[in-house]
Structure formats: structure tokens, C-alpha cells
Image: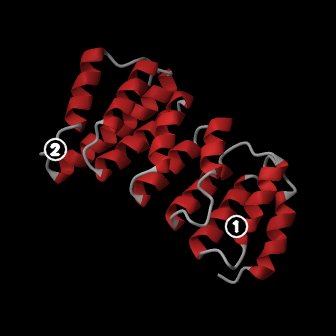
Amino acid sequence: YSPSKIEPESLDALLDFSNLSNLSTDNQQLADNALMVLGEVARVTQDSTLTSRLTETLSNASSDSRRLIALNALANAGDETTVPLLGDYLAGGSPKVRARAAQALGGIRSDAAQTLLASQLEAAQPEAVRAAALEGLGRQNLDGSTLDGLARFTSASEPLTVRRAALRALAAQKAAHPEVATTLKALLPQTQD
């Protein structure tokens, strides 16, 4: 495998195929996988044109299922220039789309992505969005105060999915913050589920 950019004609053909709406189930899976692979190619080749085309695909998606696939592709691209667009999808739409946008933002290590993810932790947000935002924060480079803030989401008053996401986020920080192991050990007797 050689990390080289895709020829424009091939890219057009792949994107056209992925945008077709009358595909059989097998061909739809193939089209979806092709789109997600294009995201990975954009990351490896650092092809801003390809990333831009993927953002167009997301913006033009006609259904939540198409948006979810396009968000996966952008997550694979991991391009910081997509943070504002991903933030738009995080802020509005169905909980599934918002959660997927949070997952995509989690893979982009930046202050802007971290701020957007943290904005979704309020109790008024859908549970799935809060959980995805917590897991996304777990993939970021967090400072000590942000890390301390994650522990509050392990409280028994939080929904189970949120608590589990907070625990996974804390565990993901162990390499950068060895002191997290102590926090997690202290939580074990309190966690019954």
C-alpha cells in the first residue's frame, strides 16, 4: 500500500457510487464502506481536497443513515478543519447523529473539539450524546482539571450509559495521567453495575 492521493476520476466515481439511493443491501454496504475508506485515505494522504469532498457528502446527505456514514468517514479523516462542521451536527439533529458527531470529534485532538464535546455534558442533553461526548473527551489530551471534572459523571445519580462512558473516558487517560488509576480504584466499591 502506498499513501498516494486518489485520481480525481476515481474519486468522483467512488463518491457518485456512495451517493446512489437505489442500491441493493450488499451494494449499499459496499458504498458505505468505500466512503469510510475514503476517510482513512484522506487521513493517511492528508488530502484536503478529499476531506472537502467528504464534508460535501455530509452536507448533502438526505437521511440520518447517510449522515451517520458520512460522519464515520470524516471521523476516519481526523482533519481539524472539519471541527466546525462536526460541531454543527453535534449541536442539532437526532441523538444518533449528534452522538456520532461526538465520536468523530473525539478523534480530533484539538482545543476546539474538546470545547465542543464538553458543551454536551449538561444533564439536559440526550443520554447517548452525553455518553459519546464523554468517550470523545477520553480520547483528547486532557489537563488535570478537565480530568477531575469527568469523575463527577460516575455518580450513581447519572444514567448507567453516562457512568460507564465516564469510566471509559477516565481509563483512556491512564497513560497520560497515571494518577487516574487511583481514582478508578476508589470508584470500584461504589460501582455496582
Q: Residue at x 35, y 38 (%)?
A: 58
Select label 1 or label 2 by which is in front: 1
* Colour scheme of the rendered structure: secondary structure
Residue 134 falls in image quadrant:
bottom right
Indicate whether 47 appears above or below 76: above
The residue furthest bottom is 192
In-front residue for pair 26/2: 26
Which residue does the numbered mark 1 point to in the structure image?
Answer: 153
Q: Earlier in the sequence, mark 1 or mark 2?
A: 2
Name which residue type carries label 2: Ser
For disc 2, the neighbor class at 10 Å (few under 14, some 14 to 19, many from 20) is few
Q: Position of residue 192 (x, y in %)?
A: 69, 84
Q: Position of residue 169 (x, y in %)?
A: 68, 57
Indicate whether 160 appears above or below 115: below
In-front residue for pair 60/188: 60
Residue 37 falls in image quadrant:
top left
Which dot marks residue 21? 2
Residue 72 appears in the rendering: yes
Location of the N terminus by quadrant is top left
Name which residue type carries label 1: Phe
Residue 174 appears in the rendering: no
